[in-house]
Amino acid sequence: MGNREDLLAGARRCLEEKGYARTTVRDIASAAQVSMAAIGYHFGSREALLNQALFAAIDEWAAGSGRLAGQGATAEERYADTWDRKSRDFLDMRWLWLANIEAFVHAQSSPELLAVLAEGQRRSRRMVAAQLAGVPEDEVAQEDVRALGSVHLALLSGVMVQALTDEEQAPTGRELVRGLRRMVELLEESVPTDG
């Protein structure tokens, strides 16, 4: 590997071991066995390198276990199975999700990173909405992107925080499905009838 690839691999190791906020330039250079100056030369800054390593890890997750396809026979069972797998991923890859949260916090004082995270959310909304609707991404309705995609991302963030905070009390896939169904029932009950 070249210095650039070594730095990405070193940054990923540092994210896994130290997290986003505590990783220093020296840590990355040491893990990659290259000079600290190489970070500036190849990436411009520690943050840019960590961001690239983090986004690559998230993309890797999304390409594999992050997909929505489950093992159940019905759509409800597949969706529940998807959430059970995601919850396991939150715990098995704790470092990735904690680094993601740390990057979000850092982004509040970094307009460049905030813009990158916002664009990632826009892409994720479309991808998830297309998967849920069972259509190609370029055919998903904008209404579904805003509704389905946004709700799924909200669930993803909330379930992730619950799993990382108290894994014993984090909802299972079946509980999430039951909760969504119950929410729909309550919303339907609250609609005033004409009369």
Image (tube, rainbow, N blue to C red):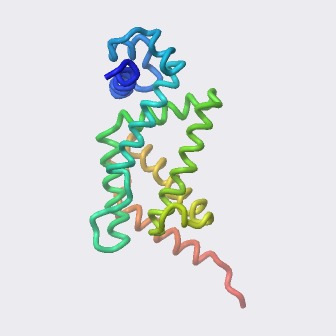
Task: Give the residue at x 38% y 36%.
Answer: 96
Horizontal relation, residue 195 to residue 119: left or right: right
Q: In which quarter of the image is residue 77?
A: bottom left
Horizontal relation, residue 42 to residue 72: left or right: right
Horizontal relation, residue 140 to residue 62: left or right: right
Horizontal relation, residue 103 to residue 192: left or right: left
Q: What is the x, y in percent for residue 160?
A: 42, 46
Viewer-proximal residue among 74 and 55: 55
Image mark count: 0
Q: Quadrant of residue 192?
A: bottom right
Q: Which residue lies furthest to the right in this view?
A: 195
Q: In which quarter of the image is the C terminus?
A: bottom right
Viewer-proximal residue among 59 and 139: 139
Q: What is the x, y in percent for residue 89?
A: 32, 45
Is residue 182 placed above or below 122 in the rendered structure?
A: below
Task: Give the residue at x 52% y 75%.
Answer: 185
Task: Give the residue at x 36% y 57%.
Answer: 83
